[in-house]
Image (cartoon, coloured by chain):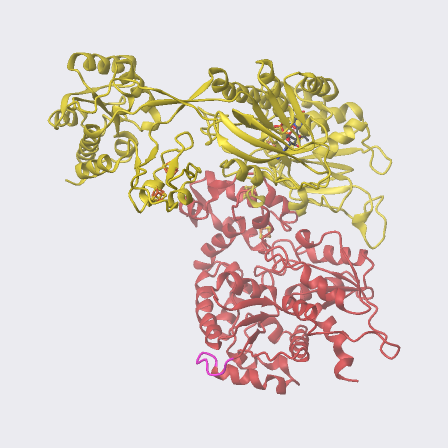
C-alpha cells in the first residue's frame, strides 16, 4: 500500500530536518538492522508516496526516543515510526505476536491475555496489605474512598512471575515507610504506553479514557508506578492534572532524603550486603524523563553497597530493546541483541549485580545474562528488590 | 548639560487654511495590482481641504518627488499626504521634500496602503474601499497638523567603550585618532579578549603574537585613550550626546557590576561625561556540559576548540604522553541546536576547525585527521580557498552529526578499574556517515569539539544598565538588521563585535569601525537633532501625581521644579504616548499625535 507522504510530513513537521544524521547515529538499532531514521525522513520529504509495507524494519524501533532527545531541530523522528506503524496497524498488517498482544490488552487489559480477575495474584501472601486496595478497587470511579497515594502496578509486575516480587517489595517498602497506598485492583488495565508506540492509536485512546476516568475517580494526590513506561505515559500523555505522577524511584529517594525510610546500619549480626552494583538507566526513566539521580541516590543509601558506573550511563545508556512493543516483536535481527552487549559492559565494571528500575530491562537483561553465560558473575535485580533485602531484617528480627 | 538651540524650519502656518496635496503611489504593481489607485485619487480630490490629488508609479522616485515639489510651488500647498508604503520606509524622504519647498516637515502625513492594505488583501473592491478610508483618515489628520520646531542638543565629546577585545580596541583607536577622548573599560587585567587565547588565525594563519600585541600597544600608548583595567561600568545616566558614566573596579573574584566598593581592584572609581557609548563585550563559548552525550566531562581526551588553541600555542598535542594517531573534530557543538537553546550558526567554527585541522596535519603528518560536519560554511573572503587547502593537505571530511561519544573498556590503554572514564584511551564517536547512509563507530585518540559562540552569561547586566533589547538568540539587537546594523534602539549607544552576534576577527573589526564612525557623527557635528514629536506638560493642569514618571519607559518625565509639576525632557522622550494617556489631569499633550488629530483620524475611518 502506498502512503501519500505530504500530509503526514506536514503534520509531523518533518520539513525542519536538516539531514544531519544525529538520529540515525544515536539509534541503538540502526547499527544492527536497516532502520535508518534519517533516510526514512528523507523519503518522506522527497517522495510523493511511500510503500510502508516494504519497511519491515519499522518494527525494530524500541521507542527509546534517543533520536527525539538528540535531534537539534526539534524534529521527533520516532513519532514518524509510530505514525507509519499506525498505517500498518490500521490495515491489519502487523506481526502476529504483536496482534496477539494487542488483542490481549483489548480483551483482558494486559498484553499476555491473562484473565483480568487474576490481576491481583502478584500480591499473594500479602492479602492483608491489599485489603485497602480491594476496597478501592470496588469503589474506584465513584470516589467513595479517598486515598492519598495510588499505586499503579502495571501488567508485567502483575502477571510475570519474575517481576511480581518487585511489586511485592514495593508494597512492603511503602508500608515500612508508613505510607498507605491503594491500587485499582482487578480494574487496573494496561497503561497503553507500548500500545501507542506500536501504532495502535485507537486502542490507546480507549485506554487513556478508561484508565483516566478510574484514576481521577480515586482522587489520589500522588500516582506511583513500578514501571517507567507507565510513568512516562501517565506523566506526558494522560493529562492527569492535579495528580503528581511519580516513578517509584522518585518517591523512594524522597523518603530516604526526608528520613522517612532508613536502612539498618550493618552490624556483626547483620553484616550487610557488600554488593558491588552497577546501574542501567532505563530509556523511559532516563533519556525520556531525565531521572538519573534518584535511582543512584537510593543505591548509595543502602549500607554496604558499592555503586560503580558503566561507561555508557545516564544520557548515553544503551537501550535494552525491551520498549516500544519490542517485548512482543522480535525485530529483523535476532542474533545481535543490545542486551548482550549491555550485560558485557556491566560485567566489565567488576560489579556482581546489575541494578535496573524497569520491568522490561529486568527481563531482557536477565535473559541476556543467561544467554551470555554470565550468570555466575552477574545477577540482575530491580532497585526495589535491593531495597527490600536491605530493609528485611528490620521487619523480621 | 543640555542646551537646546531652536531652529524653526518652514514657515508657521498655524492660522493658515489647509491646502492639501494627496499623492497615491502605485509602488509598481505592489499597490496598483490590488487597489484601484486612480479611483482613490479621484475620490481624494473631493475631500475637504484637498487642492490636488494625483497617482504616480513610484512616489519615492525622483520624478515622484519632483511632482510634489512642483505642486507645492504651483498650488501653494501647505500640507502633503502620501498614500504609499509604511512611514518607516519613506516618511523621512517625503518630510525632506516638503522641507525643501518651505513646508514644515511635520505637515506631511502618510497613509499606509501597502503593508496595511494591498499586501494583505486580495479582494480588489474592498481593498480599494479600505485604501480610500485610510487616505481620508490621513487627510483628516493633515488638516489639523501643526508645524513643529526642529530642535538640536549640544554634545559632550568622548566615547566610553565597554569591553577591551579586538572590537573595543579598534573602536578606541578610531575614536582617539579623531582627537576625541576614548575611555576603554575592560574587566580583565589585560586587553585582548578571546583572541588572546588563540594561536594562529584563519584565513592567513597569522600568529596572534604578531597581530594582538602591536594592537594592544597602540591602544595603550595612544594619548587620547584611557584604559580602565579590571573595571566595569556601574551606572549610566543621560541620553545621546550627554551620558554620565560611572566606572567601578571589578574585583578579581568577579565583583558584580554595580561595584562593591570594598572589592580588590587597582582601578579607581571614575565618573565620565561622554557623548556616546559603545558596547563591545564579546561572547562566551558554549559549555559542552550541556551536550552530555558527547562525554566532554568524562574523557580528558575530549576537549573544546578553545582548549585546542591553548594546546596549539604550547605545541603539545599528546594524550597521556603519546602522540595521537587519530584526531577527530566534531562541528556545530552547541550551535544550530534548538535543544540547547542555540538555533544560530556560530559562523567561525567551520573556519577555525579547518585551521586547527590543518595545523594538526602539519604538526603530526602521520596522524589521521577527520572532521565530522553537517555543512561546511566557508563563506568569508578566502574562506573556500582555505577549506580547499585543508582538504588538499589530507584532512578528511565526513558528513554526519556525531550523536554520541563513549569509550570501550576493552580498548587498549583503558585500565580495568572501576571508574573507566577517569583513565585514558581512545574514545569512540558514534555517528551516521550520511553520505554512505551507514551508522559508523569511529575511534579517535583526541577529539576536538568545535564549540559555538553564545551571548555572555552576564549580558543581562549590560542589558539592564543600558536598556538594550536582545534578539531571540540572546545577542544584543541592532536597530535594523540591514540598514542600521551597529545602532541600537537607544540613541547614542552602539554595538561592536561578537556581543551583537558571532563573527570572525575580520568582521569584528569591520563592525567596530562602523560603530566608531556612527558614534562619531554627532560628536563631530557638535549637536544632535531631537525628535519634535514628543510629549509636553501643561504645567497649569499638572497635579504633580508623578504617574507619568512611573509609566515612562525612558525616564523622560521628572518632578523636580519648584511647583512640583512634571517636566518632560524632550531629548529622552520617544513620543510613545504612554504618559499622555495615563495622566489623570489630561495635562500631557503628545505633539504630532494630539487628541484632536487622532480623533479626527478615527472619525474619518468610522464615518
Ligand atoms: C576556538 C576559537 C577559535 C577562533 N579562531 C579564530 C580565527 O582563527 N580567526 C578569526 O578571525 N576569528 C577566530 N575566532 C573568533 C574570535 O575569537 C572573535 O572574532 C573575537 O574574539 C571577537 O572579538 P570581540 O572583541 O567582539 O569579543 P571578545 O574577544 O569576547 O572580547 C570581549 C571583551 O570584553 C570584555 N568584557 C565583557 N563584558 C564586559 C563588561 N561588562 N565590562 C567590561 N568588559 C567586559 C571581556 O573581558 C573581553 O575582554 C575564534 C573563536 C574561537 C572560539
Ligand atoms: S537528527 Fe533531526 S535534523 Fe538530524 S537527520 Fe535526524 S531528524 Fe533530521
Ligand atoms: S526511538 Fe530509539 S530505536 Fe526508535 S528510531 Fe529512535 S533512536 Fe532508534
Ligand atoms: S560555522 Fe560551521 S561548525 Fe559553526 S555552527 Fe556554523 S555550520 Fe556549524
Ligand atoms: S501624570 Fe499628569 S498630573 Fe501627574 S505628574 Fe504627570 S503630568 Fe502631572
Ligand atoms: S511620550 Fe512616552 S517617552 Fe515621551 S515622556 Fe511620555 S511616556 Fe515617556
The residue most toward the right is A268
* Coordinates of residue B105 in the picture (x, y in percent): 29, 21
Residue B31 placement, left or right of B505: left
The answer to whether one can see residue A350 in this image is yes
Color used for chain B? yellow
Image quarter hosting the C terminus of chain B: top left
Residue B438 in which image quadrant? top right
In the image, farthest residue toward the left: B46
Please give the name of the residue rendered at 70% of the width and 72% of the height, measured from the top-left corner. Answer: A259
Q: Position of residue B392 (x, y in %)?
A: 69, 20
**Placement of A186 over or under A112, stated as above or below:** below
Q: Which residues are magenta?
A: A140-146
In this view, the residue in front, B264 or A317, is B264
Q: Percent x, y for residue A255?
A: 67, 71
Res B30 quadrant in image: top left
Q: Is residue B374 above or below residue A351?
A: above
Q: On the picture, is B207 further left or further right than A180?
A: right
- Residue drawn 63% across the image and 81% down it: A123
What kind of secondary structure does the magenta stretch mostly adopt? loop
The correct choice, above or below, for A279 with respect to B517 in the image is below
What letter labels the chain drawn in red? A
Question: Which of the two residues, A153 or B538, is positioned nearer the viewer here?
Answer: B538
Classify the position of ligand 5 by quadrant: top left, top right, bottom left or bottom right: top left
In the picture, residue A174 is in which quadrant?
A: bottom right
Can you see residue B331? no
| Residue B446 falls inside the magenta stretch | no
Nearer to the camera, A22 or B386: B386
B562 to the left or right of A182: left
Amino acid at each position: 500500500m502506498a502512503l501519500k507522504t505530504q500530509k503526514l510530513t506536514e503534520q509531523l513537521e518533518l520539513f525542519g530536518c536538516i539531514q544531519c544524521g544525529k538520529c540515525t547515529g544515536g539509534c541503538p538499532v540502526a547499527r544492527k538492522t536497516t532502520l535508518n531514521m534519517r533516510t526514512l525522513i528523507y523519503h518522506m520529504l522527497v517522495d510523493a508516496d511511500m510503500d510502508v509495507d516494504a519497511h519491515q524494519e519499522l518494527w525494530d524501533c524500541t521507542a527509546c526516543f534517543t533520536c527525539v532527545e538528540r535531534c537539534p531541530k526539534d524534529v521527533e523522528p520516532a513519532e514518524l515510526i509510530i505514525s507509519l506503524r499506525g498505517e500498518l496497524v490500521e490495515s491489519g498488517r502487523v506481526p502476529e505476536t504483536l496482534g496477539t498482544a494487542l488483542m490481549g490488552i483489548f480483551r483482558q487489559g494486559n498484553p499476555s491475555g491473562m484473565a483480568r480477575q487474576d490481576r491481583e495474584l502478584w500480591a499473594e501472601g500479602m492479602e492483608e496489605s491489599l485489603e485497602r486496595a480491594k476496597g478501592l478497587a470496588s469503589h474506584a470511579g465513584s470516589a467513595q474512598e479517598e486515598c492519598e497515594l495510588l499505586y499503579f502496578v502495571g501488567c508485567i509486575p502483575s502477571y510475570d512471575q519474575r517481576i511480581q516480587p518487585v511489586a511485592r517489595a514495593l508494597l512492603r517498602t511503602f508500608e515500612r515507610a508508613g505510607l498507605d497506598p491503594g491500587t485499582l485492583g482487578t480494574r487496573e488495565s494496561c497503561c497503553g504506553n507500548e500500545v501507542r508506540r506500536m501504532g495502535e492509536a485507537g486502542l490507546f485512546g480507549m485506554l487513556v479514557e478508561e484508565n483516566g476516568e478510574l484514576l481521577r475517580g480515586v482522587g489520589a494526590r500522588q500516582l506511583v508506578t513500578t514501571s517507567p513506561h507507565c510513568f512516562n505515559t501517565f506523566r506526558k500523555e494522560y493529562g492527569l492534572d492535579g495528580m503528581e505522577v511519580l516513578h517509584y524511584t522518585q518517591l523512594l529517594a524522597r523518603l530516604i532524603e526526608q528520613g522517612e525510610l532508613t536502612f539498618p546500619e550493618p552490624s556483626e549480626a547483620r553484616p550487610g550486603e557488600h554488593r558491588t552494583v552497577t546501574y542501567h538507566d532505563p530509556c523511559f526513566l532516563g533519556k525520556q524523563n531525565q531521572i538519573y539521580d534518584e535511582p543512584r541516590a537510593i543505591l548509595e543509601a543502602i549500607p554496604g553497597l558499592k555503586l560503580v558506573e558503566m561507561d555508557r550511563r545516564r544520557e548515553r545508556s544503551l537501550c535494552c530493546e525491551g520498549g516500544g512493543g519490542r517485548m512482543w516483536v522480535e525485530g529483523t535481527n535476532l542474533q545481535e541483541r543490545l542486551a548482550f552487549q549491555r550485560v558485557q559492559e556491566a560485567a566489565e565494571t567488576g560489579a556482581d549485580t546489575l541494578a535496573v528500575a524497569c520491568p522490561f530491562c529486568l527481563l531482557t537483561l536477565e535473559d541476556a545474562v543467561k544467554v551470555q553465560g554470565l550468570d555466575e558473575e552477574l545477577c540482575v535485580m530491580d532497585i526495589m528488590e535491593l531495597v527490600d533485602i536491605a530493609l528485611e531484617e528490620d521487619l523480621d528480627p | 548639560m543640555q542646551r537646546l538651540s531652536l531652529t524653526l524650519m518652514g514657515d508657521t502656518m498655524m492660522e493658515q487654511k489647509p491646502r492639501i496635496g494627496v499623492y497615491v503611489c502605485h509602488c509598481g504593481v505592489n499597490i496598483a495590482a490590488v487597489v484601484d489607485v486612480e479611483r482613490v485619487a479621484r475620490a481624494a480630490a473631493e475631500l475637504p481641504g484637498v487642492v490636488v490629488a494625483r497617482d504616480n508609479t513610484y512616489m519615492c522616485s525622483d520624478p515622484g518627488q519632483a511632482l510634489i515639489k512642483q505642486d507645492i510651488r504651483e498650488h501653494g500647498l501647505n500640507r502633503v499626504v502620501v498614500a504609499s508604503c509604511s512611514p518607516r520606509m519613506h516618511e523621512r524622504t517625503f518630510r525632506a521634500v516638503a522641507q525643501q519647498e518651505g513646508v514644515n516637515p511635520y505637515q506631511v502625513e502618510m497613509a499606509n496602503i501597502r503593508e496595511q492594505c494591498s499586501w494583505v488583501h486580495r479582494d480588489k473592491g474592498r481593498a480599494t474601499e479600505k485604501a480610500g478610508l485610510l487616505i481620508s483618515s490621513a487627510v483628516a489628520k493633515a488638516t489639523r497638523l501643526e508645524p513643529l520646531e526642529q530642535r538640536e542638543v549640544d554634545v559632550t565629546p568622548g566615547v566610553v567603550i565597554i569591553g577591551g577585545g579586538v572590537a573595543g580596541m579598534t573602536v578606541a583607536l578610531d575614536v582617539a585618532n579623531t582627537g576625541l577622548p576614548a575611555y576603554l573599560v575592560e574587566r580583565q587585567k589585560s586587553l585582548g579578549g578571546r583572541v588572546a587565547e588563540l594561536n594562529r588565525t584563519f584565513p592567513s594563519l597569522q600568529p596572534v603574537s604578531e597581530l594582538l600585541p602591536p594592537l594592544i600597544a597602540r591602544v595603550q600608548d595612544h594619548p587620547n585613550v584611557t584604559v580602565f583595567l579590571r573595571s566595569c561600568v556601574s551606572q549610566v545616566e543621560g541620553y545621546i550626546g550627554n551620558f554620565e558614566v560611572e566606572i567601578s573596579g571589578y574585583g578579581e573574584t568577579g565583583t558584580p557590576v554595580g561595584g562593591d566598593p570594598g572589592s580588590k581592584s587597582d582601578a579607581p572609581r571614575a565618573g565620565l561625561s561622554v557623548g556616546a557609548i559603545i558596547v563591545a563585550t564579546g561572547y562566551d563559548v558554549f559549555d559542552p556540559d550541556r551536550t552530555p552525550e558527547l562525554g566532554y566531562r568524562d574523557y580528558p581526551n575530549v576537549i573544546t576548540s578553545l582548549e585546542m588553541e591553548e594546546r596549539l600555542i604550547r605545541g603539545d598535542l599528546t594524550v597521556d604522553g603519546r602522540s595521537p594517531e587519530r584526531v577527530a573534530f566534531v562541528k556545530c557543538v552547541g550551535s544550530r541546536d534548538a535543544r540547547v537553546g542555540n538555533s544560530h550558526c556560530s559562523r567561525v567554527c567551520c573556519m577555525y576547525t579547518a585551521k586547527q585541522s590543518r595545523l594538526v596535519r602539519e604538526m603530526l603528518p602521520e596522524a589521521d585527521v577527520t572532521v565530522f560536519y553537517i555543512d561546511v560554511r566557508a563563506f568569508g573572503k578566502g574562506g573556500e580557498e582555505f577549506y580547499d587547502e585543508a582538504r588538499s593537505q589530507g584532512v578528511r571530511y565526513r558528513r554526519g552529526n556525531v550523536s554520541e561519544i563513549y569509550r570501550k573498556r576493552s580498548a587498549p590503554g583503558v585500565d580495568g578499574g572501576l571508574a573507566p572514564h577517569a583513565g585514558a584511551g581512545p574514545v569512540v564517536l558514534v555517528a551516521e556517515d550520511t553520505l554512505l547512509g551507514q551508522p559508523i563507530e569511529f575511534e579517535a585518540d583526541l577529539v576536538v569539539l568545535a564549540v559555538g559562540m553564545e551571548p555572555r552569561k552576564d549580558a543581562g547586566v549590560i542589558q539592564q544598565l543600558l536598556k538594550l533589547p536582545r534578539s531571540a538568540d540572546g545577542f544584543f539587537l541592532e536597530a535594523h538588521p540591514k540598514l542600521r546594523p551597529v545602532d541600537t534602539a537607544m540613541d547614542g549607544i552602539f554595538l561592536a563585535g561578537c556581543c551583537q552576534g558571532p563573527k570572525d576577527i575580520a568582521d569584528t573589526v569591520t563592525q567596530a569601525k562602523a560603530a566608531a564612525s556612527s558614534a562619531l557623527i554627532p560628536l563631530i557635528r557638535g549637536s544632535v537633532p531631537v525628535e519634535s514629536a514628543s510629549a509636553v506638560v501643561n504645567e497649569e493642569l499638572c497635579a504633580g501625581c508623578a504617574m507619568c514618571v512611573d509609566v515612562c519607559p525612558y525616564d523622560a518625565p521628572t518632578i523636580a521644579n519648584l511647583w512640583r509639576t512634571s517636566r518632560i525632557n524632550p531629548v529622552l522622550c520617544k513620543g510613545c504616548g504612554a504618559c499622555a494617556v495615563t495622566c489623570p489631569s489630561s495635562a500631557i499633550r503628545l505633539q504630532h499625535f494630539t487628541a484632536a488629530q487622532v480623533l479626527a483620524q478615527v472619525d474619518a475611518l468610522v464615518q
